Amino acid sequence: MKNLNKIYLVVFLFPLFLSGCSAIFGEKNDPQTNQIFQQGAIDPSLVPTAVGYVPIFPFFTNFSHPIDVYVGYDEMVYVIDDNGLNILDQKGTHNAIIPIPGATDVIQDRALNLYVAGRVNIPSVGNRAAIYHLINVATGNYQIVDTLIHPLCDDSRSSTGNRGVDDEAVQFTGLATLADNSLYVTRTGPRNDINSFIRPDNAVLVYDPQGNNTGYALGLNPVSSSLKSVLGVSSIASLAAPPQRVNGISTSPSFIITQASADPTIEYRTLFISVTNDPDLGLIYSEYPQLLNFDHTKADRFLYSSFRFKKPEDCYIAPDNLGYYFVVDSGTDSLYVFTNQGFEGVNPPANSIFKKQVIVSFGGPGADGTSSGPFSFNDPSGVCYNRKMIYVADKNNNRICRYKLNTDMQ
């Protein structure tokens, strides 16, 4: 009798549920509704409706071509667009805009120092890549306390004789901070003589918390594709990320990078670089071939599959116990999700019929044939993750999209 009562209850409530759906999802013939229920359009055969990402509305709007998004240790949301550095609260309310020339990337360390990659115009010298160091940003009384300017911020080029005529072509493309507040800066440019004592333009520079250049990622190949190359690096992400925690923040100096170079020979465009500290040799930057373990009993797609990406723009590592990797690719207009073992997808829920990773990557044309639906992007250029929420800077849709796994919404 109990089971029969449950059946009656479901039958009674089901019409009520349907009548309320339009308030939540819109009408059945609404293109946005279709996209929500067709989240797995990127590969319907993998039935992502069992586990998948759900859009969290409202998306944040009123931007001009946003290219980076970051949720800081101070819980503020930072967005880089044509106007510079936008400062928002968690509800998406715009608090201020700081005009940083040529801004492309933003990051914050655990001491709440904010760093923005941009440009600076120096009279009689020209336009140069720069890293702006800001403090007191969230309070509204910000100060720029330092600016790292190429080539002076590179110890191998700090003297006049080591400057080049191609310095204006150099760009700072990515930023990441570590648990000790040191800073990684990715750089691209035309000068890449591997036999020179001057560091190549294509490099990952390292700075201590005081802004001193302490070295660079020695051994990464600036001229040819490999498992530890740096060709047109577009982003970098470390294993240390907000929220602030007394215990549990990773102290590993390892990182992942994305390579957006137009070079068609780049087989692996998202790379994990393992960093170890040898007592005699110092820091060693190594490839991570473990990600070439294509265990098809556990997953159908992999981070290190040949030519997996077209033009990856940004990456992020979830700092929680799952440690998912996120990559946005403007070449496919998609967001990709991988485990820290390089398997594409997320872990299937307990007691699930699925035994492999469940594909939750999405993007591409929407159900209505446009690129503006809730599961579509138009040149996604930035991604971050905070408290189980994914944020995507959807550049040509002028918005910041937010998503959560439906299994995290309990």
Image (cartoon, rainbow, N blue to C red):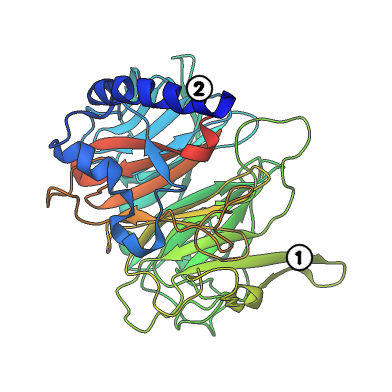
Q: Residue at x 49, y 71 (%)?
A: 300
Crowd band around label 2 with a 10 angstrom C-alpha radius: few (<14), some (14–19), many (20+): few
Residue mark closest to the camera, 2 vs 1: 2
Q: Is residue 216 above or below residue 209?
A: below
Crowd band around label 1 with a 10 angstrom C-alpha radius: few (<14), some (14–19), many (20+): some
Name the disc covering residue 5, or none.
2
Q: Residue 217 at x, y = what percent?
A: 61, 66
Depth check: give the residue in front, 153 or 102: 102
Q: Is residue 397 above or below residue 110?
A: below
Q: Residue at x 28, y 41 (%)?
A: 36
Name the disc covering residue 335, or none.
none
Depth check: give the residue in front, 170 or 224: 224
Q: Is residue 218 above or below residue 175?
A: below
Label 1: which secondary element: strand
Query: Does residue 10 appear in the picture of this structure?
Result: yes
Residue 201 relative to residue 353: left or right: left
Query: Does residue 135 appear in the picture of this structure?
Result: no
Q: Residue at x 39, y 56 (%)?
A: 47
Name the disc covering residue 276, or none.
1
Q: Is residue 335 above or below residue 259?
A: above
Q: Tell me the quadrant of the picture where the C terminus can be found.
A: top right
Label located before the other in sequence (2 or 1): 2
Label 2: which secondary element: helix
Under mark 2, the amino acid is: Asn
Toward the right, the furthest residue is 279
Under mark 1, the amino acid is: Thr
Structural distance between the alpha carbons of marks 2 and 1? 62 Å
